[in-house]
Image: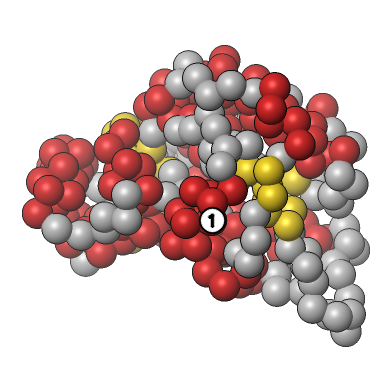
């Protein structure tokens, strides 16, 4: 998600807070995810950000209903942007969503697609995909076997559009496309959300002047900075120069 924002909005400074001490969110009860996500968002608002991006499907599902009322700045989440794009892309109305358990159990995508009654939705939790990505495994026979287990039912349902409902999943587009087939459109929640962030900044007149010096980005983690940097560079690239320990993290214990 952050990579997509950095690519589409290169003049904007980003403050990124990764709750690595308590990840993965996708396997936790939705109430617990909500508590953690709001803690992180509260801190970012305290830093004076002009907009919030909830860069996680599980967290978006957990705080979807109240984040916009809670904060004085615009909020962008990852579920509705992907939903809109999937509805526009689908030819048959058969749409699949792959996501974490927490997102699936929240039924956030079912709620988001209610505005498109012609759509038949097929939601599949894929909990092992995050483990593969964070281990640096994006190909190979073991991953392919797991992918077939998750995706073959969606193929049998004839889905023509697949929402990648976790921001880790775009790193698996090779295997996902292979199993689903070239005729299936893959919709990245990360890419679609970054587009919405751009639109939000333009519509609200809060874009940063591109003539200003290159922005400085800040990366914070509730876990170990060295470990975050090692994994984060796979997602974020050269912009991830250094990582700081989130000051309040000492009171947060991994669950």
Residue linked to disc 1: 229
Residue 81 visible somewhere in the drawing: no
Q: Count the labels in the image.
A: 1
Relative height, residue 173 to residue 106 (above, below): below
Residue at position x 20%, y 55% from top?
180
- Left or right? Give the position of 43 relative to 227: right
Residue at position x 79%, y 32% from top?
42
> For the residue carrying disc 1, how many other residues have a C-alpha within 10 Å: few (<14), some (14-19), or many (20+)?
many
Of residue 184 and residue 20, the one placed in the foreground of this image is 20
- Left or right? Give the position of 92 relative to 112: left
- Left or right? Give the position of 62 relative to 13: left
Quadrant of image for the N terminus: bottom right
* Residue 247 in picture, x, y percent from top left: 76, 36
* Residue 232 in picture, x, y percent from top left: 51, 56
Of residue 252 and residue 140, the one placed in the foreground of this image is 252
Relative height, residue 205 to residue 43 (above, below): below
* Residue 128 in picture, x, y percent from top left: 27, 37
């Amino acid at each position: 998600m952050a990579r997509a924002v950095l690519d589409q909005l290169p003049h904007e400074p980003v403050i990124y807070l990764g709750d690595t001490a308590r990840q993965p969110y996708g396997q936790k009860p939705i109430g617990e995810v909500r508590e953690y996500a709001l803690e992180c968002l509260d801190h970012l608002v305290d830093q004076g950000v002009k907009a919030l991006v909830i860069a996680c499907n599980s967290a978006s599902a957990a705080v979807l209903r109240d984040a916009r009322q809670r904060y004085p700045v615009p909020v962008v989440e990852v579920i509705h942007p992907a939903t809109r794009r999937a509805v526009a892309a689908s030819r048959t109305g058969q749409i699949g969503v792959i996501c974490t358990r927490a997102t699936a159990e929240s039924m956030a995508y079912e709620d988001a697609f209610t505005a498109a009654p012609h759509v038949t939705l097929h939601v599949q939790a894929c909990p092992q995909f995050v483990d593969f990505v964070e281990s640096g495994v994006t190909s190979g026979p073991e991953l392919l076997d797991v992918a077939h287990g998750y995706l073959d039912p969606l193929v049998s349902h004839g889905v023509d559009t697949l929402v990648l409902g976790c921001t880790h999943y775009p790193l698996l587009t090779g295997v996902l496309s292979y199993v689903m087939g070239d005729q299936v459109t893959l919709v990245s929640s990360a890419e679609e959300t970054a587009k919405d962030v751009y639109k939000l900044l333009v519509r609200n007149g809060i874009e940063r002047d591109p003539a200003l010096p290159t922005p400085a980005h800040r990366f914070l983690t509730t876990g170990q900075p060295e470990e975050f940097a090692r994994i984060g560079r796979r997602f974020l690239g050269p912009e991830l120069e250094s990582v700081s320990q989130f000051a309040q993290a000492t009171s947060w214990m991994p669950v």
